[in-house]
Image (tube, helix red, strand yellow):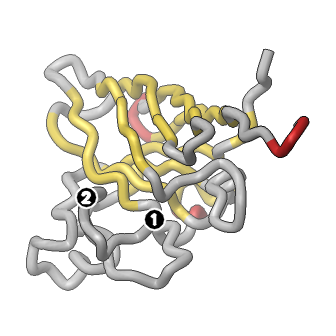
């Protein structure tokens, strides 16, 4: 990189899971550090589904081995717009009546480079909605009480060509 020029970094994840949950997502980090997540996930039940980056890129025991939400700053669970949130808290995605969720998220806490990079970590789609830490359930401050993990995949670098 000549002159320390900042570049766009790209990553991809292939989602697989229970009941034919499938999809692919692309992550594009622009030079300012903002990351755009876009893609499609199919096979979901209609409605809201918690959508998170989990700490581990380990799927040896399916989605259950991806660990907790990615939380390098040791904060409580929250909404993507909250100051108090895990870096991996990306809120909810919405599946239509056909079970398809079109994903388009822009976030500043999920970089593809640097100290808190999400490369090698996992994307997890949950069975239920994420209460964004505001549900009053005992799991609200850790998981958003989003239920079972129905789909996941490991985030990897994408070719620039």
Quadrant where the C terminus is found in the figure:
top right
Quarter-of-image position of residue 116: bottom right
Q: Residue furthest front?
A: 3
Taking the spot 45% from the left edge, 53% from the top edge, the residue there is 108
Q: Viewer-proximal residue, 41 or 85?
A: 85
Report whether residue 18 is seen.
yes
Quadrant where the N terminus is found in the figure:
top right
Taking the spot 59% from the left edge, 32% from the top edge, the residue there is 14
Provide the residue designation for mark 2: 81
**Whether residue 108 is situated above or below residue 134 in the rendered picture:** above
Mark 1 surroundings within 10 Å by alpha-carbon count, few (fewer than 14), some (14 through 19), many (20 or more) = many
Q: In this image, 39 relative to 111: left or right?
A: left
Residue 37: x, y in percent? 46, 35
> In the image, which is nearer the foreground, mark 2 or mark 1?
2
For marks 2 and 1 on the same chain, the one whose residue lies earlier in the sequence: 2
Residue 132: x, y in percent? 20, 64
Q: Secondary structure at mark 1?
A: loop
Q: Viewer-proximal residue, 113 or 6?
A: 6
Residue 11: x, y in percent? 66, 35
Q: Secondary structure at mark 2?
A: loop
Provide the residue designation for mark 1: 87
Q: In this image, 11 relative to 148: left or right?
A: right
Report whether residue 59 is seen.
no
Residue 153: x, y in percent? 59, 43
Q: In this image, 44 relative to 23: left or right?
A: left
**Whether residue 122 is situated above or below residue 13 in the rendered picture:** below
**Whether residue 31 is situated above or below residue 56 in the rendered picture:** above
Cα distance in 3D space between marks 2 and 1:
11 Å
């Amino acid at each position: 990189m000549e002159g320390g020029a900042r570049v766009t970094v790209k990553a991809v994840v292939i989602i697989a899971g229970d009941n034919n949950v499938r999809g692919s997502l692309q992550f594009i980090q622009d030079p300012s550090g903002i990351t755009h997540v876009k893609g499609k996930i199919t096979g979901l039940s209609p409605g809201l589904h918690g959508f998170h980056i989990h700490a581990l890129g380990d799927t040896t025991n399916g989605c259950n081995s991806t660990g907790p939400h990615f939380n390098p700053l040791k904060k409580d669970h929250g909404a993507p717009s909250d100051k108090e949130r895990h870096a991996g808290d990306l809120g909810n995605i919405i599946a239509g009546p056909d079970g398809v969720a079109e994903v388009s998220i822009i976030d500043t806490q999920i970089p593809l480079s640097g100290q808190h990079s999400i490369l090698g970590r996992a994307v997890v789609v949950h069975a239920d909605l994420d209460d964004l830490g505001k549900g009053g359930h005992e799991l609200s401050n850790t998981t958003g009480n989003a239920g079972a993990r129905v789909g996941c995949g490991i985030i990897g670098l994408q070719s620039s060509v």
